[in-house]
Image: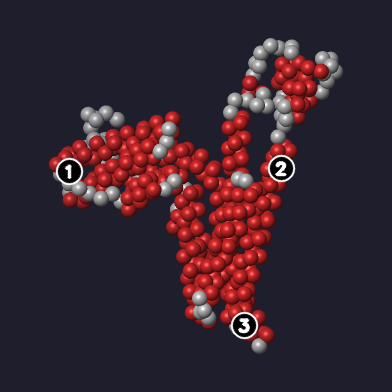
Amino acid sequence: MSHNAPPNDSGSLGRTPSAGDIRRWRRYLADERAEGAVYRTLAEKRTGEEKAILIGLAEAEQRHEEHWRRMLGEHADRPSSPSVRRTLLRFMARHFGSVFVLALAQRAEGNSPYVKDQDATRQMAADEMVHEEVVRALATAGRKRLSGNFRAAVFGANDGLVSNLALVMGIGATGVSTAVVLFSGIAGLLAGALSMAAGEFVSVRSQRELMSASRPTQVTLSAAPHLDLDHNELVLVYRARGMSQADAEHRAGERLGDFTCDCDPSLSFHPDGHQQAQQDEDDTIGSALGASTSSFLFFASGAVIPILPYLFGMSGLAAVALSVALVGVALLCTGAVVGLLSGASPGKRALRQLAIGWGAAAVTYVLGLAFGTSVA
């Protein structure tokens, strides 16, 4: 957008801006400055194409900043604070990994108020929608790298929180002594952590072995020189890999030396980018040992929270209440992190996680009360 173009399409400069207009525009100006600073900070930590893209986003935010400067006129130089979200983004850009920052930036770009604000141009509203897609694409690689071991870590912590809280509340509701509740919680921690670790190790290792067994080999390259030109099954190999009859025959001809060119590289088993694709696949799955270790540690870290009150000598209703409260805070945190990284609302994911966890614990507590009464 040219800096000399009219600030908007609605002719809003024909009116005298109100105090509310000035405050809103100043907030927009502060937010654009903050977003531009975020992208520039991230660009300093990157190289190549990703760095250039982040710089391009920062320059776009600067164009939007100039729009609000023109709208504000003499009011543009008065200091104003960006929104809490933009302030958090700037802090995280300086101190944390870019995947968290990009996930927050994606939501910020997607919730732009410019679509409904007549003082913003249609070009600016369109820019923000495009920015969301750009940031989404940049965040994808980071999400893939986290998705393997991070999945095991988050699910391990959540399982530890919910299962051990349910166990402690169910056992405690029967009226047994505090020592029994504590030892039950410790047993649940160890049993669950070991089970999670073993399960993740077997799951990831089996998935890797399955994909390795399903991946075609390059045996056709070594076998081709020794095949009978008139009677061989090389065409069947390529047909089994999904090629059409014509493509399979052509590819077999290339392997047997009928053609001197690799006429269609896309039909090769190892086309350009295959190694990178395989690396991305491995990053997404994660390592068996890494997933197993993460599951054990995070399950244990989650499972220890419900028994903390009992470890410090508390008992009765006070211990139950504190245990429920501590687990509630932890569930809100894990839900918010998952929501943040998935690009969804952290608040909604946090509340959903809390409802599921507390709901499961409530069921076992009621069952424990009923069982305790029947025993009595």
The image quadrant where one finds the C terminus is bottom right
Q: Residue at x 62, y 46 (%)?
A: 287
Amino acid at the residue labelled 2: Glu
- Residue 349 in the image: above or below residue 233: below
Q: Nearer the viewer, mark 1 or mark 2?
A: 2
Disc 1 target residue:
77
10 Å crowding of disc 2: few (<14), some (14-19), many (20+): few
The residue at the far bottom in this view is: 376
Q: Earlier in the sequence, mark 3 or mark 1?
A: 1
For numbered disc 2, what is the local secondary structure? helix
The image quadrant where one finds the N terminus is top left
The answer to whether 87 appears left or right of 205 in the picture is left
Q: Earlier in the sequence, mark 1 or mark 2?
A: 1
Q: Which mark is residue 176?
A: 3
**Where is residue 225 drawn, in percent x and y?**
78, 17
**Along the line of sight, the residue nearer the viewer: 218 or 78:** 218
**Where is residue 271 drawn, in percent x and y?**
63, 25
- Residue 287 in the image: above or below residue 55: below
Q: Residue at x 61, y 51 (%)?
A: 291
Amino acid at the residue labelled 1: Asp
Amino acid at the residue labelled 3: Val
Q: Tell me how far mark 3 sits from mark 2, CA to CA.
A: 47 Å
Disc 2 target residue:
209
Q: Earlier in the sequence, mark 3 or mark 2?
A: 3
